[in-house]
Image (spheres, helix red, strand yellow):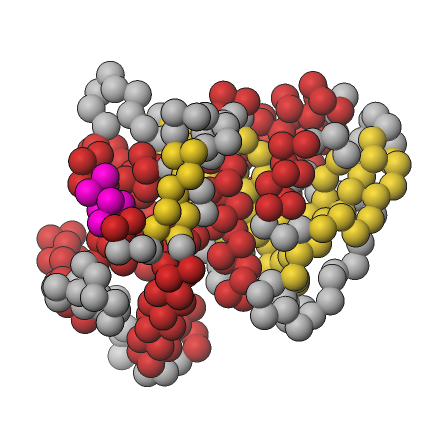
Amino acid sequence: MDFVDAPAQTRERTILDLREFSRKLVRELGFMRSTLADSDLAPSAVHAVIEIGASPGIQARDLANILRLDKSNASRQIAKLESIGLVTRTTSTDDARSSELYLTDAGQSLRTRIDQFATDQVSHALRRLAPADQQTLVKSLSLYADALAHDNDSNATPKGDTGAGRIFEGYRPGCIGDVASLHARFYAKHSGFGVFFERKVATELAEFAQSLPHSDKALWLYMENGRSLASLAIDGDAATRIAHLRWFIVDDSLRGSGIGRQLIGRAMEFVDERFDQTYLWTFRGLDAARHLYDSVGFALTHEAEGQQWGATVVEQRFSRSSKRAKGTPGKRRRNPDAR
């Protein structure tokens, strides 16, 4: 007998199905309740605690962008969390006019309980799915979430308005060229690197991006008007439980904005959930990045002079043990990666 492919579902039917699934997710995850995750907090407050914990030092305006809240709503939310002792503010070291948000000890304790609640909720659901279906689900939800975020950002920014930038997770069209360009210009100025270095960044980042989405790998981009102005990636190996921090760079125009701190905060959250050890390669003299590495627990484990990049530099390897570390640092690579 002949086999005939079933006709593809209409776009209208697909839209209706996705809307129905989205409503069901909202209900089953508890967003219709007055409190969320057994926390006595409204859903928006729970998400604020999670984001501040993931990016210690985040500024209020950036938190508002992530949570899709207007400035006044975000301010009220932060004030409430301060009043009940979950969040504290400190004056920014980069800009005295701005404040940085941190969780208090009570806030950290609550965030740990929220994380456990959410982990249990997802874990119980995944038990009903085969491993192959779990990976399909992760990839599909990642693509769907990215598509929603991209569309929401486009709709939120009127024509002619530069709009506020925000951090995205995952590949974005044009990001490979943007990130390679950031590295090429920065390291040409500070270390004298040339085409070999730029080509290496572009080709290896392109190969990495093709593997996304992936449960052990992640790429974060800070974007404004469709351009990537900062980046950081985690390239992890589940078998060794070791992660490689790569391509960390922030455009000079964002100095003092806290974007670098937010990126590295998200990355450390990611690795602490999955890996025992994280390492990175960099060069001596990059003091701003060194300060961030120190602040999240990285320690210098090796340095040596090298000339393979077209200029004499002192290569440095930093390592960091995760909160529940049981592994050992990974082996040194002959050629250091672009940050």
The answer to whether residue 77 is magenta is yes
Quadrant in which the C terminus appears? top right
- As rendered, which of 90 and 110 lies closer to the eye? 90
154 above or below 122? above
- As rendered, which of 68 and 193 lies closer to the eye? 68
State the residue at coordinates (78%, 42%).
316
Can residue 209 be seen here? The reply is no
Where in the figure is residue 55, as x and y percent of width and height?
Answer: 44, 47
Q: Which residues are magenta?
A: 75-80
- Residue 152 image-quadrant placement: top left
59 above or below 4? above
Where in the figure is residue 129, as x and y percent of width and height?
Answer: 35, 79
Where in the figure is residue 259, as x and y percent of width and height?
Answer: 47, 35
Left or right: 184 with respect to 309? left
State the residue at coordinates (49%, 48%).
265
Can residue 161 be seen here? The reply is yes
- As rendered, which of 85 and 218 lies closer to the eye? 85
- Residue 159 image-quadrant placement: top left
Q: Main secondary structure of the magenta part?
A: helix
Quadrant in which the N terminus appears? bottom left
- As rendered, which of 307 and 110 lies closer to the eye? 110
Where in the figure is residue 314, as x and y percent of width and height?
Answer: 83, 35
State the residue at coordinates (65%, 45%).
294
State the residue at coordinates (58%, 27%).
182
The answer to whether residue 110 is magenta is no
Left or right: 278 with respect to 10? right
Left or right: 275 with respect to 215? right
**Count of labels in the image:** 0
